[in-house]
Image (spheres, rainbow, N blue to C red):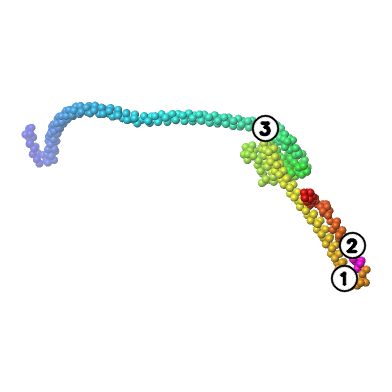
Amino acid sequence: MQEVNCPHCDQVFEMDAAGYADILNQVRGVEFEKELHARLKDAEEKHKMAVELAESKIAEQKNTEFVNKEKQIERLKAELASAEMKSQLAVKDATNPLEMEITKLAHQINSAENERSLLKKSLEDKYVTQIKDREGEIERLRDFKAKLSTKMLGETLELHCENEFNTLRSIAFPNAYFEKDNDASAGTKGDYVFREADENGTEFISIMFEMKNEGDTTATKKKNEDFLEKLNKDRIAKKCEFAILVSVLEADNDLYNNGIVDKSHRHPNMYVIRPQFFIPMITLLRNAAMKSLKVRNELAFVKEQNIDITNFEEDLENVQTGFAKNYDTAKKQFEEAIKSIDASISDLNKVKDKLLRSGNNYRLANDKIQGVSIKKLTRQNPTMKAKFDALKEGSEDGNQLN
């Protein structure tokens, strides 16, 4: 226990250590607070005085610095003005040539721009003109196609092709045959047959035509391929060399729109064409056939020449064989006669007869030899006759010159 004396009433208290410590802490806390407040107040006053002193010094320093700054600013402004003037002069000196060059380049650019504009306008005008021309051509072709389709549908494709051919018949095909195929005796017939022969009547080209319009199709036959087999049968039945399908079917198929289509891999000598290739196709095949005919005629002529030479050689061989045979016979008879003379004088009459017969054989042989002439040998051989006549004329000309 601890005795505690109250300072106000002088009363003495007893308390334990815990209570004493608590009171001691309270007393210390109050004193501490008082002392703390006093020190804080003192520190606050010192701080306030220091702040005021610092503010005063700062204000004084600022005034001094402001005056100095103003002077420095004025000085710097003067230097800046001088530097700007010098810079402007230097820039002017440096930029004058550049400005002149820029002006020159600007002028060139303007000139180039003007030329480019003129060229662009010229090209635009040119392209516009070309485009208009193309559009006009397209429109013309469309109109032509529409008219052609209308014409074909109205007159039929067959009549259109017939009119096209008849327009050129007297000029390009005066000796040609082009008529509608009306002969169905073989169980089938095409549309038109074209044939042409040379001046000797030798046929050198024949074409079977089949024409197919859009109105000619059925539910089962709508493509060009559907008509090729029948066309080939018609070609064979009418003994034609070529078969051509003139068709407007499959109008969007580029294969048929781009030109002549060769179908020989399906059927011999077969082609599919659009109506605009009708006359050109006939002309193409006809010209090729005429060249082939010329070659065939030349070969036939060479063959005939070879036959003439062969006949001449055979005739000459027959003459030589006959003479040799007669000579052998006469020789044997003469030898026999000589033997008979040597053997017996009594056989002289017989020898005489044999000699007479031998002489007769010699005469016959001689007659045959004498009868052999160029005229007889070349009687059936016009080629050799022409050659001997030419040789004879050349010899007579030479004698006249001498």
* Type of amino acid at the residue the image marks with label 3: Leu
- Residue 167 lies left or right of residue 105; in this view the side is right
The amino acid on which the numbered mark 2 sits, given as a three-letter code, is Asn
Near mark 2 (Cα within 10 A), the count class, few <14, some 14-19 or many ≥20, is few
- Is residue 101 one of those drawn in magenta? no
Q: Is residue 3 left or right of residue 277?
A: left
Q: In the rendered structure, which disc, 2 or 1, sits on the residue that comes first in sequence?
A: 1
The quarter of the displayed image where residue 137 is located: top right
| Res 246 quadrant in image | top right
Q: Is residue 386 visible?
A: no
> Which residue, given by chain and number where applicable, does mark 3 sit on?
148
Q: Residue furthest left?
A: 10
Question: In the image, 266: left or right of 367?
Answer: left
The stretch of residues the image draws in magenta is 351-363
What separation in Å lies between label 3 and label 1 (alpha carbons)? 105 Å
Residue holding disc 1 = 339
